[in-house]
Image: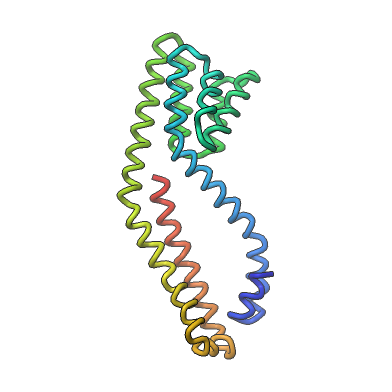
Amino acid sequence: MGTFFLTSLLADPVFAVPLAAGGFLLGPRALNLYLFRRRIKAFRSNIEFGLDTLMTALHIGMSMEKALREASMHSPEPIKSEFLRLAEEIAGGLPEPEAFRGLAARIPCVEAEELCDAVELYSKVGGPRSLNLLREVLTSLRDGISTRYQVHQHTKGAKTSAILVTFIPVAYIFGMLVLAPDLFRPLVDTQMGRTAAFVAFLVFCFGLWLVMNILRSIEDF
């Protein structure tokens, strides 16, 4: 309904109906996608804490299940819940590689894939040597996390600039609406103005989508 009223002000009601339907259908999907990507980002940011505890627990002789439970106790979300779920699945009889493949499917990112490969190698090799191999792979994974963090730090200024440039027009429009609302009256009162405003809105949405894709490509590094 909000989309309908907004587009009714900016353009003809003919445009408002399909846009309102699109907002109603795609809005929940967009929200779920945002929450999903936010969870992946949190996983990637906090996985290093879980790996440190996991390696320590395995080194002192704990089984994978107990090591995961121990790591979950000292890790932030979503590492805590994911490691606890892995421990429950392994305790229920699911093989360790399959449990970690499930993790990689729920949290599709480089870190989860590498962790899955490391545990699969650990399960196949077995014996004392497997722990050394697992430690080396997890250490390499942790180094990769640190490298990606440094890259994100170096690109933070560029990302901030892109966000500012994107939303400067929005701030300008709201400012002018407060200071000189009469300047926008032709955009509402005339057919040509409503059409121009509608086209500008679509162009802005396309530009916003383009900027978000660029920022997402940086986050996915």
Q: Residue furthest top?
A: 127
Q: Position of residue 146 (x, y in %)?
A: 34, 37
Give me the residue at 44% from left, 20% from top.
Answer: 121
Q: Position of residue 216 (x, y in %)?
A: 44, 52
Q: Which is more toward the observer, 31 or 75?
A: 75
Give the position of the C terminus as an image quadrant: top left
Q: Which is more toward the observer, 55 or 196?
A: 55
* 125 is higher (above) or lower (below) than 172: above
Give me the residue at 42% from left, 61% from top.
Answer: 211
Q: Relative to residue 105, is residue 164 drawn left or right?
A: left
Q: Position of residue 176 (x, y in %)?
A: 47, 82
Q: Relative to residue 113, is residue 152 drawn left or right?
A: left
Give me the residue at 35% from left, 47% from top.
Answer: 152
The image quarter containing residue 198 is: bottom right
Q: Which is more toward the observer, 117 or 212?
A: 212
Q: Relative to residue 210, is residue 144 drawn left or right?
A: left
* 83 is higher (above) or lower (below) than 199: above
**Colour scheme in the image?**
rainbow
Give the position of the N terminus as an image quadrant: bottom right
* 111 is higher (above) or lower (below) than 133: below
Give me the residue at 47% from left, 71% from top.
Answer: 204
Q: Position of residue 184 (x, y in %)?
A: 52, 86
